[in-house]
Image (spheres, grey):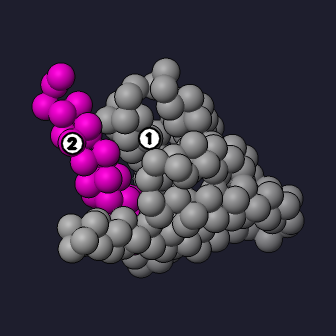
């Protein structure tokens, strides 16, 4: 076994997952802060943030899937990687058309990536802790995506603030899962 496989086999991947969820939460919190400050003042900053968000999701899912047996064993994450990668390109194109198109693209991405996240959480439910929050997050992401899609059809031009709320809820769910895993690990060690 490689060092990564030994580490995952030794602790069941709980430490990795805890760190993964914390890193996802921190990224999302920082993204929201920058989006609501610099992103609201500068279209180039907002555009960069809107492209980075689905790209980060693809990269994070890729690393997590590789750390947990590879893409073949983590099909829902493999699907999410594909969806997030394609939507990164779609967001770039949508930025040249208008923010309604960007919000529509984010809506489609949120639906499909949310359903993929839901699938990953359900698959991990019996082997990992903290997945109830990921199930809620995936379901809420899909619902938010439907809301974004409907909102994108309205004549009022949206802003990055529309997406910031979505990212904020994502940060919350990742943080709850990370804390849940941390507390569970502390209880295991104490027992």
Please name the residue shown 52% across and 36% down the image: 77
Identify the magenta region.
1-30
| Position of the N terminus by quadrant | top left
- Above or below — where is 28 with respect to 37? above
Residue 8's label in the rendered image is none
Task: Give the mark, 1 or 2, whose residue is nearer the N terminus.
Answer: 2
Please identify the quarter of the rendering in which residue 153 is found. bottom right
List the residue tagged with mark 1.
61
- Nearest the viewer among 147 and 3 is 3
Tell me, yes or no, whether the highlighted magenta stretch contains residue 21: yes
| Position of the C terminus by quadrant | bottom left
Camera sees residue 177: yes
**In this rendering, position of residue 144 left or right of residue 125:** right
Q: Position of residue 59 (x, y in %)?
A: 39, 39
- Above or below — where is 75 with respect to 168? above
Please name the residue shown 26% across and 37% down the image: 9
Please identify the quarter of the rendering in which residue 136 is found. bottom right
**In this rendering, position of residue 129 left or right of residue 96:** left
Please name the residue shown 26% across and 40% down the image: 8
Q: Position of residue 96 (x, y in %)?
A: 62, 44
Tell me, yes or no, whether the highlighted magenta stretch contains residue 153: no
Camera sees residue 89: no
Given the current orientation, which residue lies at the most extreme front position? Answer: 191
- Number of residues whose C-alpha sits closer than 10 Å to that of mark 1, classed few (under 14), some (14–19) or many (20 or more): many
- Nearest the viewer among 133 and 39 is 133
The answer for how far apart the CA atoms under marks 1 and 2 are is: 22 Å
Q: Position of residue 54 (x, y in %)?
A: 51, 47
Q: Classify mark 1: helix, strand or loop.
A: helix
List the residue tagged with mark 2.
10
Q: Nearer the viewer, mark 1 or mark 2?
A: 2
Please identify the quarter of the rendering in which residue 188 is found. bottom left
Q: Classify mark 2: helix, strand or loop.
A: helix
């Amino acid at each position: 076994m490689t060092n990564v496989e030994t580490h995952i086999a030794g602790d069941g991947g709980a430490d990795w997952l805890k760190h993964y969820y914390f890193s996802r939460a921190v990224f999302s919190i920082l993204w929201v802060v920058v989006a609501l400050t610099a992103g609201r003042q500068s279209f180039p900053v907002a555009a960069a943030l809107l492209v980075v968000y689905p790209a980060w999701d693809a990269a994070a899912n890729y690393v997590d899937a590789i750390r947990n047996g590879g893409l073949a064993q983590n099909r829902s994450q493999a699907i999410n990687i594909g969806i997030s990668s394609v939507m990164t390109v779609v967001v770039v194109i949508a930025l040249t058309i208008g923010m309604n198109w960007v919000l529509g693209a984010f809506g489609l991405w949120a639906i499909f990536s949310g359903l993929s996240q839901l699938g990953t959480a359900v698959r991990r439910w019996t082997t990992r802790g903290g997945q109830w929050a990921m199930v809620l997050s995936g379901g809420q992401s899909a619902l938010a995506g439907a809301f974004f899609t409907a909102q994108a059809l309205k004549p009022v031009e949206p802003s990055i603030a529309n997406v910031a709320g979505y990212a904020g809820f994502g940060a919350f769910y990742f943080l709850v899962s990370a804390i849940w895993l941390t507390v569970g690990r502390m209880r295991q060690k104490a027992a």
